Image (tube, grey):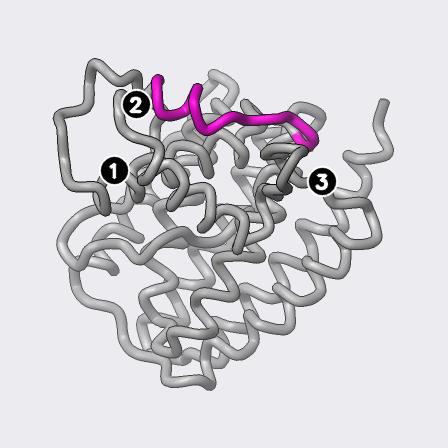
Amino acid sequence: MTEHRRPAPPNEPAKRATPRGPAQHAPVRHGDNSLRVYDVLRQRIATRQYAPGERLTEAEIAAEFSISRTPVRQALHRLAVEGLIEVKNGVGIRVTEVDDAELRDIYELRMALATLMGRLSPRPLSESDLAELQALKHRLQEMLRAEAEPEVGEYADICDRFYARLNNVVGNAFLRQFQDQLYNQTDRYWYGWMAKADIRREVEYFYYEVEESLRALAVNDFDALGMIRRNHISMMLTRAESYRRLR
Protein backbone atom coordinates (compact mmCIF):
# COMPACT_ATOMS: atom_id res chain seq x y z
CA MET A 1 0.00 0.00 0.00
CA THR A 2 1.52 3.12 1.15
CA GLU A 3 4.92 5.07 0.53
CA HIS A 4 7.69 6.61 2.47
CA ARG A 5 8.68 8.51 5.40
CA ARG A 6 11.80 10.48 6.32
CA PRO A 7 14.93 9.30 4.43
CA ALA A 8 16.30 6.02 5.78
CA PRO A 9 19.89 6.25 7.06
CA PRO A 10 22.25 4.63 4.55
CA ASN A 11 23.14 1.69 6.78
CA GLU A 12 20.11 1.37 9.07
CA PRO A 13 16.60 0.07 8.42
CA ALA A 14 13.96 2.79 8.63
CA LYS A 15 11.53 2.14 11.46
CA ARG A 16 7.99 3.22 12.20
CA ALA A 17 8.01 5.73 15.04
CA THR A 18 6.63 4.28 18.26
CA PRO A 19 4.99 6.48 20.90
CA ARG A 20 6.88 6.20 24.19
CA GLY A 21 6.38 7.66 27.61
CA PRO A 22 8.62 10.35 29.10
CA ALA A 23 10.42 7.93 31.43
CA GLN A 24 12.06 6.26 28.42
CA HIS A 25 13.57 9.48 27.07
CA ALA A 26 16.96 10.78 28.15
CA PRO A 27 17.41 14.58 28.08
CA VAL A 28 18.57 15.74 24.64
CA ARG A 29 18.97 18.99 22.74
CA HIS A 30 15.89 21.03 21.80
CA GLY A 31 16.29 20.18 18.12
CA ASP A 32 16.32 16.47 18.92
CA ASN A 33 13.36 16.86 21.27
CA SER A 34 11.42 18.65 18.55
CA LEU A 35 12.07 15.89 16.02
CA ARG A 36 11.15 13.19 18.54
CA VAL A 37 7.87 14.89 19.41
CA TYR A 38 7.11 15.45 15.73
CA ASP A 39 7.73 11.76 14.90
CA VAL A 40 5.50 10.52 17.73
CA LEU A 41 2.64 12.96 17.10
CA ARG A 42 2.75 12.34 13.34
CA GLN A 43 2.57 8.60 13.96
CA ARG A 44 -0.36 9.01 16.32
CA ILE A 45 -2.19 11.02 13.68
CA ALA A 46 -1.32 8.42 11.02
CA THR A 47 -2.69 5.56 13.13
CA ARG A 48 -5.70 7.58 14.25
CA GLN A 49 -4.75 7.58 17.92
CA TYR A 50 -5.43 11.26 17.34
CA ALA A 51 -8.56 11.22 15.21
CA PRO A 52 -9.45 13.97 12.72
CA GLY A 53 -11.01 16.84 14.63
CA GLU A 54 -9.37 15.93 17.96
CA ARG A 55 -7.88 18.80 19.99
CA LEU A 56 -4.35 18.83 21.41
CA THR A 57 -2.66 21.11 23.94
CA GLU A 58 0.95 22.24 24.19
CA ALA A 59 0.95 21.85 27.97
CA GLU A 60 -0.17 18.21 27.94
CA ILE A 61 2.33 17.25 25.25
CA ALA A 62 5.19 19.01 27.06
CA ALA A 63 4.26 17.25 30.31
CA GLU A 64 4.13 13.85 28.62
CA PHE A 65 7.63 14.23 27.18
CA SER A 66 9.03 16.08 30.23
CA ILE A 67 10.29 18.94 28.06
CA SER A 68 9.64 22.65 27.71
CA ARG A 69 7.04 24.06 25.35
CA THR A 70 9.62 25.39 22.89
CA PRO A 71 10.43 22.06 21.15
CA VAL A 72 6.73 21.13 21.34
CA ARG A 73 5.88 24.37 19.53
CA GLN A 74 8.51 23.59 16.88
CA ALA A 75 7.06 20.11 16.31
CA LEU A 76 3.51 21.48 16.11
CA HIS A 77 4.62 24.11 13.62
CA ARG A 78 6.03 21.39 11.34
CA LEU A 79 2.83 19.35 11.60
CA ALA A 80 0.82 22.47 10.77
CA VAL A 81 2.97 23.21 7.70
CA GLU A 82 2.29 19.65 6.52
CA GLY A 83 -1.44 20.19 7.00
CA LEU A 84 -1.88 17.54 9.70
CA ILE A 85 -2.99 20.01 12.38
CA GLU A 86 -4.22 23.59 12.46
CA VAL A 87 -3.29 26.11 15.14
CA LYS A 88 -5.62 29.06 15.67
CA ASN A 89 -5.37 31.82 18.24
CA GLY A 90 -8.25 31.61 20.69
CA VAL A 91 -9.28 28.20 19.36
CA GLY A 92 -6.29 25.97 20.00
CA ILE A 93 -4.75 23.02 18.15
CA ARG A 94 -6.91 20.63 16.16
CA VAL A 95 -6.11 17.59 14.01
CA THR A 96 -7.26 18.47 10.50
CA GLU A 97 -9.94 16.69 8.53
CA VAL A 98 -10.04 16.00 4.78
CA ASP A 99 -13.31 15.38 2.95
CA ASP A 100 -13.74 12.74 0.25
CA ALA A 101 -13.23 15.13 -2.67
CA GLU A 102 -10.04 16.59 -1.17
CA LEU A 103 -8.74 13.13 -0.36
CA ARG A 104 -9.20 11.97 -3.94
CA ASP A 105 -7.40 15.09 -5.18
CA ILE A 106 -4.47 14.32 -2.89
CA TYR A 107 -4.26 10.79 -4.27
CA GLU A 108 -4.36 12.16 -7.82
CA LEU A 109 -1.44 14.43 -6.94
CA ARG A 110 0.47 11.52 -5.47
CA MET A 111 -0.03 9.52 -8.65
CA ALA A 112 1.23 12.39 -10.79
CA LEU A 113 4.28 12.95 -8.58
CA ALA A 114 5.14 9.24 -8.54
CA THR A 115 5.87 9.33 -12.26
CA LEU A 116 8.39 12.13 -11.66
CA MET A 117 10.59 10.08 -9.33
CA GLY A 118 12.29 8.53 -12.35
CA ARG A 119 12.82 11.87 -14.11
CA LEU A 120 14.00 14.40 -11.54
CA SER A 121 17.57 13.52 -10.55
CA PRO A 122 17.00 9.83 -9.70
CA ARG A 123 19.89 7.96 -8.10
CA PRO A 124 20.66 4.23 -7.70
CA LEU A 125 20.04 2.66 -4.33
CA SER A 126 22.90 1.49 -2.16
CA GLU A 127 23.61 -2.18 -1.51
CA SER A 128 22.28 -1.64 2.01
CA ASP A 129 18.99 -0.26 0.69
CA LEU A 130 18.58 -3.13 -1.78
CA ALA A 131 19.38 -5.73 0.90
CA GLU A 132 16.72 -4.24 3.17
CA LEU A 133 14.13 -4.31 0.36
CA GLN A 134 14.91 -7.97 -0.31
CA ALA A 135 14.53 -8.76 3.40
CA LEU A 136 11.13 -7.05 3.46
CA LYS A 137 10.04 -9.03 0.39
CA HIS A 138 10.96 -12.27 2.15
CA ARG A 139 9.04 -11.24 5.27
CA LEU A 140 5.94 -10.57 3.16
CA GLN A 141 6.32 -14.05 1.65
CA GLU A 142 6.42 -15.52 5.16
CA MET A 143 3.29 -13.61 6.16
CA LEU A 144 1.40 -14.91 3.11
CA ARG A 145 2.49 -18.51 3.73
CA ALA A 146 1.54 -18.46 7.42
CA GLU A 147 -1.84 -19.75 8.53
CA ALA A 148 -2.32 -16.85 10.93
CA GLU A 149 -3.93 -13.69 9.62
CA PRO A 150 -1.34 -10.93 8.97
CA GLU A 151 -1.28 -8.18 11.59
CA VAL A 152 -2.09 -4.67 10.42
CA GLY A 153 0.64 -3.21 12.65
CA GLU A 154 3.40 -5.32 11.12
CA TYR A 155 2.07 -4.73 7.63
CA ALA A 156 2.10 -0.96 8.21
CA ASP A 157 5.64 -1.13 9.60
CA ILE A 158 6.86 -3.00 6.50
CA CYS A 159 5.15 -0.42 4.28
CA ASP A 160 6.96 2.41 6.06
CA ARG A 161 10.32 0.67 5.88
CA PHE A 162 9.88 -0.17 2.21
CA TYR A 163 8.97 3.34 1.16
CA ALA A 164 11.69 4.93 3.28
CA ARG A 165 14.24 2.88 1.36
CA LEU A 166 12.52 3.25 -2.01
CA ASN A 167 12.41 7.03 -1.65
CA ASN A 168 16.19 7.15 -1.49
CA VAL A 169 15.89 7.00 -5.29
CA VAL A 170 14.41 10.52 -5.26
CA GLY A 171 17.24 12.99 -5.71
CA ASN A 172 15.10 16.12 -5.91
CA ALA A 173 14.58 17.48 -2.39
CA PHE A 174 11.42 19.44 -3.26
CA LEU A 175 9.78 16.40 -4.87
CA ARG A 176 10.62 14.23 -1.90
CA GLN A 177 9.30 16.76 0.61
CA PHE A 178 6.03 17.19 -1.27
CA GLN A 179 5.58 13.42 -1.61
CA ASP A 180 6.11 13.01 2.12
CA GLN A 181 3.53 15.68 2.98
CA LEU A 182 0.89 14.14 0.75
CA TYR A 183 1.64 10.67 2.06
CA ASN A 184 1.21 11.83 5.64
CA GLN A 185 -2.15 13.36 4.72
CA THR A 186 -3.51 10.10 3.27
CA ASP A 187 -1.86 7.58 5.58
CA ARG A 188 -4.28 8.20 8.46
CA TYR A 189 -7.31 7.53 6.25
CA TRP A 190 -5.74 4.40 4.82
CA TYR A 191 -5.17 3.12 8.36
CA GLY A 192 -8.86 3.60 9.13
CA TRP A 193 -9.91 1.73 5.98
CA MET A 194 -7.77 -1.26 6.95
CA ALA A 195 -10.28 -2.12 9.67
CA LYS A 196 -12.66 -3.05 6.84
CA ALA A 197 -10.11 -4.56 4.46
CA ASP A 198 -9.04 -8.10 3.65
CA ILE A 199 -5.58 -7.76 5.18
CA ARG A 200 -4.17 -10.89 3.56
CA ARG A 201 -5.19 -9.59 0.16
CA GLU A 202 -3.63 -6.19 0.92
CA VAL A 203 -0.36 -7.91 1.91
CA GLU A 204 -0.49 -9.85 -1.36
CA TYR A 205 -0.97 -6.68 -3.42
CA PHE A 206 1.89 -5.05 -1.59
CA TYR A 207 4.12 -8.06 -2.18
CA TYR A 208 3.53 -7.67 -5.93
CA GLU A 209 4.54 -4.00 -5.73
CA VAL A 210 7.74 -4.83 -3.85
CA GLU A 211 8.60 -7.57 -6.33
CA GLU A 212 7.96 -5.36 -9.38
CA SER A 213 9.93 -2.49 -7.84
CA LEU A 214 12.93 -4.73 -7.20
CA ARG A 215 12.90 -5.85 -10.83
CA ALA A 216 13.02 -2.22 -11.97
CA LEU A 217 15.73 -1.37 -9.45
CA ALA A 218 17.86 -4.31 -10.61
CA VAL A 219 18.40 -2.49 -13.92
CA ASN A 220 18.03 1.07 -12.57
CA ASP A 221 14.93 1.66 -14.68
CA PHE A 222 13.65 4.60 -12.68
CA ASP A 223 10.91 5.54 -15.15
CA ALA A 224 9.46 2.04 -14.75
CA LEU A 225 9.80 2.36 -10.97
CA GLY A 226 7.77 5.57 -10.99
CA MET A 227 5.03 3.98 -13.10
CA ILE A 228 4.88 0.96 -10.78
CA ARG A 229 4.40 3.33 -7.85
CA ARG A 230 1.76 5.33 -9.70
CA ASN A 231 -0.22 2.24 -10.75
CA HIS A 232 -0.26 0.73 -7.26
CA ILE A 233 -1.45 4.02 -5.74
CA SER A 234 -4.27 4.05 -8.30
CA MET A 235 -5.32 0.48 -7.49
CA MET A 236 -5.09 1.20 -3.78
CA LEU A 237 -7.39 4.20 -4.19
CA THR A 238 -9.95 2.08 -6.04
CA ARG A 239 -9.93 -0.51 -3.25
CA ALA A 240 -10.07 2.19 -0.58
CA GLU A 241 -13.21 3.68 -2.12
CA SER A 242 -14.93 0.32 -1.84
CA TYR A 243 -13.85 0.01 1.81
CA ARG A 244 -15.18 3.50 2.50
CA ARG A 245 -18.63 2.50 1.33
CA LEU A 246 -18.78 -0.36 3.82
CA ARG A 247 -20.69 0.32 7.03
The residue beneath circle 2 is 65
Q: Position of residue 233 (x, y in %)?
A: 63, 57
Which quadrant does the C terminus fall into? Answer: top right
Q: Residues within 10 Å of mark 1 (few under 14, many from 20)?
A: many
Q: Taking 108 as reference, is 29 above or below it?
A: above
Q: Is residue 61 magenta?
A: yes
Furthest toward the front, the residue is 90
Name the element at disc 2.
Answer: helix
Seen from the viewer's position, the closer of residues 226 and 19 is 19
Name the element at disc 3.
Answer: loop
Q: Residue at 55%, 70% (x, y): give it.
A: 114
Q: Position of residue 191 (x, y in %)?
A: 60, 33
Q: Which mark is residue 33?
A: 1
Q: Is residue 144 left or right of residue 169?
A: right
Any part of residue 111 in sight:
yes
Name the element at disc 1.
Answer: helix
Badge nearest the viewer, 3 or 1: 1
Distance between the alpha carbons at the discs numbered 1 and 2: 9 Å
Marks 1 and 2: CB-CB under 8 Å?
yes
Q: Earlier in the sequence, mark 1 or mark 2?
A: 1
The residue beneath circle 3 is 97
